[in-house]
Image: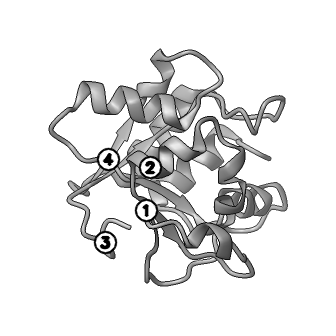
C-alpha cells in the first residue's frame, strides 16, 4: 500500500483487542508491536503505532481514527484494509461515518466479492500485486513445523521461532 497508492506513509496500528476477536488467543500487544517494528525497520514510509494501547478496549476503528485526527490534525488519514474485511465493514461501529469522513483503500484478496461496498465513493480498491499470505497462514505454517522463510523478514522469523510462538 505504501508503494501502490498516493500515500506518503503507512502507519500500522497494533490493536490490543479487536471487537471481532474477543476470546481468541493473541500474543501480548507489546510483542505484536515489537514484531511489527522488526518487520518494518529501515523503511521510512512505514511506522508502527501503539495508539490503541492507551484507549478503551475493545478497539473500534472510528475511535482510533478520531484519536489520530485529534493528535495529528495536519494529516489526512486513510483506512487501509484487506478486501476480505470489506464485507464486514457495515457491522463496524459507526461504519457510515467512517465511509463519510475517510477514504478507504482496499488491498485485493482472492475469492472475495465486496461489490456493494466498492460502490461507495470513498472506497478504492488498489491495484497491487496479489499476495495471498495472511497472519493466519503464517501461524498455521509455524504450528505445522513448516518454514516461514520468505513470508516474513528473517529477523521476524527468528523472533517467532526463538520465542516458540504457535509451536
**Is the Cβ of the residue at disc 2 closer than 8 Å to that at disc 1?**
yes
Give the image quarter of residue 19.
top right
The percent position of residue 157, horizontal first and vertical second, equals 56, 56
The percent position of residue 138, horizontal first and vertical second, equals 69, 61
Tell me how far mark 3 sits from mark 1, CA to CA.
14 Å
Q: Secondary structure at mark 3?
A: loop
Tell me how far mark 3 sits from mark 2, CA to CA.
20 Å
Q: Which mark is residue 5?
A: 3
Tell me how far mark 3 sits from mark 4, CA to CA.
13 Å
Q: Earlier in the sequence, mark 3 or mark 1?
A: 3
Q: Which mark is residue 104?
A: none
Q: Secondary structure at mark 2?
A: helix
Tag 1 residue: 122
Q: Secondary structure at mark 1?
A: loop
Tag 2 residue: 100
Q: Earlier in the sequence, mark 4 or mark 1?
A: 4
Q: Secondary structure at mark 4?
A: loop
The percent position of residue 30, horizontal first and vertical second, equals 52, 27
Amino acid at each position: 500500500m505504501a508503494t501502490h497508492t498516493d500515500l506518503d506513509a503507512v502507519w500500522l496500528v497494533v490493536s490490543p483487542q479487536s471487537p471481532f476477536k474477543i476470546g481468541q488467543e493473541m500474543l501480548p500487544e507489546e510483542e505484536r508491536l515489537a514484531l511489527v517494528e522488526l518487520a518494518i525497520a529501515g523503511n521510512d514510509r512505514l511506522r508502527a503505532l501503539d495508539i490503541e494501547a492507551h484507549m478503551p478496549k475493545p478497539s473500534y476503528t472510528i475511535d482510533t481514527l478520531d484519536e489520530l485526527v485529534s493528535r495529528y490534525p495536519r494529516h489526512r488519514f486513510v483506512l487501509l484494509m484487506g478486501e476480505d474485511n470489506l464485507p464486514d465493514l457495515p457491522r463496524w461501529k459507526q461504519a457510515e461515518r467512517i465511509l463519510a469522513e475517510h477514504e478507504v483503500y482496499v488491498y485485493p484478496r482472492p475469492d472475495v466479492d465486496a461489490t456493494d461496498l466498492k460502490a461507495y465513493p470513498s472506497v478504492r480498491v488498489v491495484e497491487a500485486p496479489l499476495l495471498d499470505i495472511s497472519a493466519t497462514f503464517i501461524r498455521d505454517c509455524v504450528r505445522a513445523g513448516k518454514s516461514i522463510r520468505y513470508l516474513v523478514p528473517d529477523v521476524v522469523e527468528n523472533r517467532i521461532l526463538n520465542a516458540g510462538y504457535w509451536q
